[in-house]
Amino acid sequence: MRIRGRMHRDTSTARERSGRLAVLMVLAAMIPLAGVATPAVGVASPDLEEKVREIASELRCVVCQNLSVADSPSDLAKEMRNLVRELVEQGKSREEIQAYFQSRYGDFVLLEPPKRGFNLLVWGLPFVALLVGACGVYLVARRWTERREPVAPLVDPGLLERVRRELREREGSGRS
Amino acid sequence: MSWKKALIPLACVPVIILLAYGFWTDPRAIPSPLVEKAAPNFKITVYDGRDLSLDSLKGRPVVLNFWASWCYPACYEEAPLLETTWRKYREQGLTMVGVAIRDKEATAREFMRRFNFTFPNGPDPGSKISIDYGVYGVPETFFIDRQGRIAYKHVGVLTPGLMETKLRAILKES
């Protein structure tokens, strides 16, 4: 009975092993199929994603603090990214997509403000400030170098001469 | 040399002008490029199943309100005013439409039940309508006149006085 029992266990183990092997073989056979099937499931092409990222990185997430639509984890930014993707898929150009968001949110939505109107101050003021500062430094430096007048003596020359004379006289009387 | 002495105060003038501009401008005011322009058309399937579009409301003044049940307390403060205004002015041709932003249907319905909303409200899948209207957050309200132009956009909770003023402006136009 024991032997029979053991044999039974042995045969069942062998069956289990062959069953597992069959499952593994089926799974192994499915691996290439899975690889082929993956892109069809809806993963966008790298080129499309790159273009979406490029456009989204120039758009401001309107509910964040200085984050682009590409970088923000907020729900609105995610939906804006999806919309950018949709528009790219429709064949819209980068300029057209930017113009669309600009027409809805104004210049604020652009991370790089357009160079016109009041925005010109943002672009021009740093250079103007730099120029004014450089002129100021130049003028001050020139004043320092040109107006170097002889330093006024700290002691009255007459007094100095008197002290020297008296010292000489004292030295003379000491020797004699 | 007197011009040199005047140079420092003169240099301060543009800085003062810039500061004055900054102080006089409300940093919380978000100008919408859509104001005074044609309101973008929208299509919404309201919670009772009907389809509604702005095009189908041509010739009627429309108040388009963006809300969310998670927008507490602002949307909760504003909701009673929306319903009372709708009931008061519906006979004069006003259409009020509510758009629930990034909301779950169950919580949005609960919000509508709580404030007895009887005007049409619907979800905004993918925030398409919100983005098309340049919405930043909730609540935001658009007053659209009979010509389909956005007459005014309000960010934040509407007060009864402001609601009346803006409503009269879009109702009176023929």
Image (tube, coloured by chain):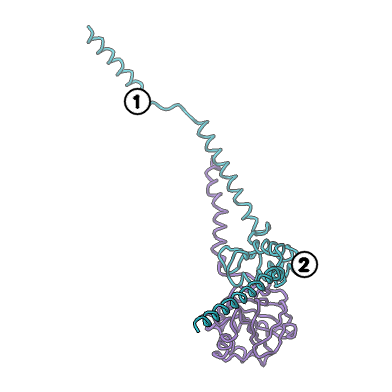
Q: Which chain is purple?
A: B
Q: Position of residue A49 (x, y in %)?
A: 69, 64
Label 2 CA crowd tier, 10 Å (few <14, some 14–19, many 20+): few
Q: Position of residue B60 (x, y in %)?
A: 71, 86
Image quadrant for the N terminus of chain B?
top right
In the displayed structure, B46 sits above or below A159; it is below
Q: Which chain is cyan?
A: A
Chain letter of the residue beneath label 1 in the structure image: A
Q: Nearer the viewer, residue B35 or A140?
A: B35
Chain letter of the residue beneath label 2 in the structure image: A
Q: Position of residue B142 (x, y in %)?
A: 64, 79
Give the amino acid type for the residue marked by disc 2 in the picture.
Answer: Gly
Give the amino acid type for the residue marked by disc 1 in the picture.
Answer: Val
Q: Secondary structure at mark 1?
A: loop
Q: Which residue is mark 2?
A: A91
Image quadrant for the C terminus of chain B?
bottom right
Mark sitting on residue A53: none
Q: Quadrant of residue B126?
A: bottom right
Is residue A113 visible from the viewing direction of this image?
A: yes
How far separated are the C-alphas under marks 2 and 1?
Answer: 87 Å
In the displayed structure, A164 sits above or below A147; it is above
Q: Nearer the viewer, residue B49 or A34?
A: A34
Q: Which residue is mark 1?
A: A155
- Answer with mark 2 or mark 1, whichever residue precedes in sequence: 2
Depth check, mark 2 against mark 1: the one in front is 2
Q: Nearer the viewer, residue A41 or A84?
A: A41
Q: Position of residue A53 (x, y in %)?
A: 66, 63
Tell me, yes or no, whether dots 2 and 1 are on the same chain. Answer: yes
Q: At 73% across and 76% down in the image, what residue appears?
A: B38
